[in-house]
Amino acid sequence: MTLTAENISKRYFRKTGEANYFEAVKPLSLSLEPGRVTVLMGRSGSGKTTLLHMLSGLLTPDSGKIHLDGTDLYSLTDPALSRLRNEKIAVIPQGRSTVDSLTVLENILLPGMLLRQNRDKQAEKWMEALGISQLASAMPRELSGGELRRAAIARALAQDSPVILADEPTGDLDDENTKLVLSLLQAAAKEGKTVFLVTHESDALSYADNAYRMDSGVIAPISQ
């Protein structure tokens, strides 16, 4: 599925400073296509996560539109948008995203449970691929940062959604697991999924079909 942003922007209003608002994302257009890994580089605070949240249906743009294969995300009702996100858009968030009262396996299965879908086989497949099968019955508080990150990645991949939006997915990982995760995301794209990878790690560029850099809310292509 193709995810397209048309002239979207986001600003936050504030009471202090020279201006009464901060432009996190200045007007931009972007097309994310199936079968391709699109990498967005940039320093912290450059607007990368804000852009990803708008693309994922989690944050309404102040201007412009976002379409998923012709469907205007923000024209949908909240229940319809929530269902579309769960079925079509898998998000790997930057921060901690587990439910502390659920086991690792239950956390990975949670999106499918909300749709009354059995994703046991997918969960097993991706936990094994990411080296966390032995943690299935563990509680999130027992895991390291890197293990929590891999659990979040396993949950997103187990959704088997046509679109994957990953926000700093390798931030807590060592070199070996970083290469593993980037390879898995690249393989997902080769299978026809639309993959958008937000990162500050230059190693990700070698896995990219398209690459951009974001600075102060503005994106520009990176020549490869």
Image (tube, rainbow, N blue to C red):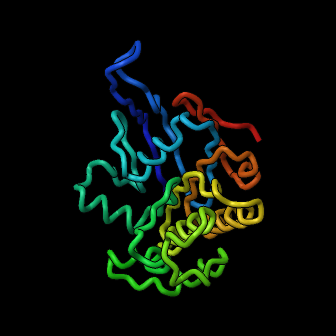
Identify which residue is drawn at 41% across, 85% down: 118
Spot occupied by residue 130 in the image (x, y as percentages of width and height): 65, 74
**Is residue 30 shown above or below 109?**
above
- Left or right: 123 with respect to 203? left
Spot occupied by residue 61 in the image (x, y as percentages of width and height): 36, 39
Quarter of the image with the C terminus in it: top right
- Left or right: 77 with respect to 224? left
Identify which residue is drawn at 47% across, 75% down: 108
Q: Residue furthest front?
A: 142
Identify which residue is drawn at 60% across, 66% down: 144
**Is residue 178 shown above or below 44?**
below
**Is residue 22 shown above or below 1?**
above
Picture mark count: 0
Spot occupied by residue 125 in the image (x, y as percentages of width and height): 59, 82
**Is residue 180 shown above or below 21?**
below
Looking at the picture, tell me which residue is in the foreground, 168 or 86. 168
Spot occupied by residue 78 in the image (x, y as percentages of width and height): 24, 56
Looking at the picture, tell me which residue is in the foreground, 203 or 138. 138
